């Protein structure tokens, strides 16, 4: 008999499948503390959660029989994925079931904001008949900036069009063609921010999206705009927003999610007359809760019974013999992909991988998944993209993955060459595994290099002029940035050249700006691996 623990409020209708299964026993215990969960989890084969239960390393460690954690919803930020992976616990989610519900909540918030519904309600039930204080605005003809055009963002855009809004959108995977097909205008974050009357964010919280709307964006915003966050707390800088509202730049904000949940009692949003809030209710409808609970129950049952399943967030299904051959290349593959994703500008259309030498003779599919994960995780977050779902996510975003195998290895026993083709540029990198030395990058675009793929890298494209190396070194030195290694490659004497530095700590933004002003430097990019 498999024992399943449900530790958050999850729809009974949705998990009926589990109640009905003769080989499953379901226990519902919502609201457990971490200690309480640790004390009982050892008895269970599966754990079903939403976003409240924190499935920490301690919980995973105590879950000696635990085979699967099922998240009835999208975000898995409450689940320690590395710990689950390390312990062979499969984590699955239900990414599709609450899309429409969250999209509709976004609209509820946007309209409540436009028409001051919560504030007007409070006054009316308080006995006041105040028809003067709540002059609203129409959505029609307004520009809606949508940051993040995945499942929810795309649905929001589609509905906003029905309201007569003009949609300006940004997503690293949104190409001109797709934007045109969706009837939205593609822009950069700052362009959108400068033009929008309403902004709504629908990205995951990643290092890149954290505070993607902050003081600078509020400075360039259209006065009187309104902003909505039904995605994740932290995408919009909460304190910068309060300042922008108090300086009359932002006319109102609607938040369903917070940097800290629940927010502290003295959080400025909770008392501010121009901010409306809901307690992370985006996915809370009967329909969505049923959908996600059904999805997750079906998968949990398959996993417990040892059958094929989908939506694993963390498990690589690689046969042992293939794993043995390929595993040494996994880190290199992921770093090649991640390096290029950081280096390349524009919306990615194709990830082209060429395997040569030893690698041309094996089934490299599992390795390709790592390369694709490296590319996608730069924008989608490492907690979202894994080697199980990376190809699927690429396909969903119209990113082609093209594999080629050739004999020529340019003198290496094995060589992986990855080219990222975006709507703006093609960039490529080649890497190899050197016996005794581990993974190395051996070529960037057309320039041969020899770089250990780790830590803080600085890639500089420049003109091959005397003194440039010294100037870069001096500038970093006076700013206390120690150079660990430096490589220079060039096309021909006096022609295009590349400099690859590894440095001991991240290079401050202002130092990068100073470097960018050196006349010989064409462009530069700091990369963290
Ligand atoms: N409030 C709620 O209850 C609730 C419910 C469901 C989902 N969510 C959250 O909503 C968000 C969106 O969910 P989804 O299902 O649409 O996810 P999704 O993965 O389908 O879409 C997210 C999109 O964000 C894009 N993105 C990543 N980095 C970006 C950047 N720097 N700028 C612009 N776009 C970027 C990705 O390319 C992707 O297309 C997630 O954070 C999810 O956790 C909240
Ligand atoms: O990531 C999600 O699915 C949403 O944030 C919903 O979270 P919830 O299941 O706790 O409502």
Image: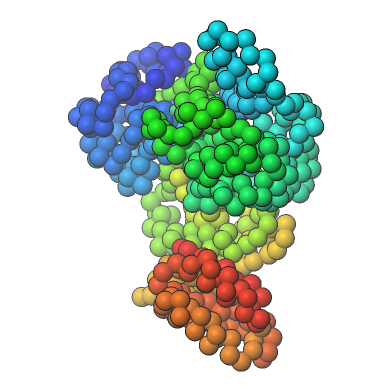
Q: Nearer the viewer, residue 345 or 236?
A: 236
Based on the displayed image, in which of its 4 quarters is residue 259 positioned?
top left
Q: Nearer the viewer, residue 164 or 364?
A: 164
Residue 365: percent from left, percent from top: 53, 53
**Total tally of numbered discs in the picture:** 0
Q: Residue at x 68, y 57 (%)?
A: 346
Q: Residue at x 42, y 48 (%)?
A: 319
Residue 413: percent from left, percent from top: 49, 74
Left or right side of 193 for 322? left
Q: Residue at x 52, y 59 (%)?
A: 338
The quarter of the picture where the N terminus appears is top left
Q: In this view of the protein, can residue 56 be seen by the observer?
A: yes
**Residue 510 against residue 6 in the figure, above or below:** below
**Residue 332 against residue 493 in the figure, above or below:** above
Residue 291: percent from left, percent from top: 52, 21
Q: In this view of the protein, can residue 381 be seen by the observer?
A: no
Residue 273: percent from left, percent from top: 55, 27
Based on the displayed image, in which of its 4 quarters is residue 25 positioned?
top left
Q: Residue at x 58, y 10 (%)?
A: 128
Left or right side of 295 for 174? right
**Residue 404 against residue 51 in the figure, above or below:** below
């Amino acid at each position: 008999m498999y024992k399943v623990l449900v530790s958050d409020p999850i729809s009974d209708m949705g998990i009926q499948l589990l109640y009905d299964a003769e080989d499953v026993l379901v226990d519902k215990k919502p609201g457990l503390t971490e200690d309480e969960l640790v004390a009982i989890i050892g008895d269970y084969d599966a754990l079903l959660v939403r976003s409240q239960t924190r499935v920490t390393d301690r919980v995973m460690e105590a879950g000696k029989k635990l085979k699967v954690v099922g998240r009835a919803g999208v975000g898995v930020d409450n689940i320690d994925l590395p710990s689950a992976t390390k312990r062979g616990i499969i984590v699955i989610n239900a990414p599709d079931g609450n899309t429409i519900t969250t999209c509709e909540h976004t609209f509820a918030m946007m309209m409540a904001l436009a028409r001051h519904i919560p504030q007007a309600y409070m006054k009316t039930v308080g006995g006041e008949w105040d028809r003067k204080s709540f002059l609203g605005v129409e959505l029609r003809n307004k520009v809606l900036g949508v940051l993040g055009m995945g499942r929810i963002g795309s649905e929001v855009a589609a509905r906003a069009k029905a309201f007569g809004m003009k949609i300006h959108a940004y997503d690293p995977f949104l190409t001109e063609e797709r934007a045109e097909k969706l009837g939205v205008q593609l822009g950069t974050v700052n362009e959108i921010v400068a033009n929008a009357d309403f902004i709504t964010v629908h990205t995951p919280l990643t290092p890149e999206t954290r505070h993607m709307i902050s003081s600078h964006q509020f400075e360039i915003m259209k006065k009187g705009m309104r902003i909505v966050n039904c995605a994740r707390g932290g995408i919009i800088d909460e304190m910068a927003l309060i300042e922008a509202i108090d300086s009359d730049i932002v006319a109102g904000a609607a938040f369903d999610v917070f940097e800290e949940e629940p927010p502290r009692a003295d959080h400025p949003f909770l008392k501010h007359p121009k901010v409306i809030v809901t307690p992370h209710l985006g996915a809370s409808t009967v329909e969505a809760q049923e959908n996600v609970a059904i999805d997750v129950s079906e998968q949990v049952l398959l996993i417990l019974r040892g059958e094929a399943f989908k939506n694993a967030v963390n498990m690589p299904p690689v046969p042992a013999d293939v794993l043995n051959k390929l595993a040494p290349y996994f880190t290199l593959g992921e770093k090649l992909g991640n390096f290029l994703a950081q280096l390349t500008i524009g919306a990615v259309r194709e990830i082209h991988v060429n395997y040569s030498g030893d690698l041309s003779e094996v089934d490299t599919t599992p390795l390709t998944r790592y390369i694709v994960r490296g590319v996608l995780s730069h924008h989608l977050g490492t907690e979202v993209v894994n080697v199980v779902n990376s190809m699927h996510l690429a396909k969903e975003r119209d990113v082609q993955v093209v594999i080629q195998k050739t004999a020529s290895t340019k003198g290496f026993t094995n060589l992986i060459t990855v080219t990222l083709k975006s709507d703006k540029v093609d960039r490529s990198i080649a890497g190899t595994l050197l016996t005794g030395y581990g993974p190395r990058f051996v070529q960037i675009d057309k320039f041969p290099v020899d770089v250990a793929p780790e830590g803080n890298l600085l890639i500089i494209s420049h003109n091959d002029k005397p003194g440039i190396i010294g100037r870069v070194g001096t500038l970093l030195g006076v700013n206390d940035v120690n150079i660990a290694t430096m490589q220079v490659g060039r096309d021909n004497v006096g022609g295009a050249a590349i400099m690859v530095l590894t440095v001991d700590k991240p290079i401050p933004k202002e130092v990068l700006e100073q470097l960018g002003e050196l006349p010989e430097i064409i462009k530069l990019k700091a990369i963290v691996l």
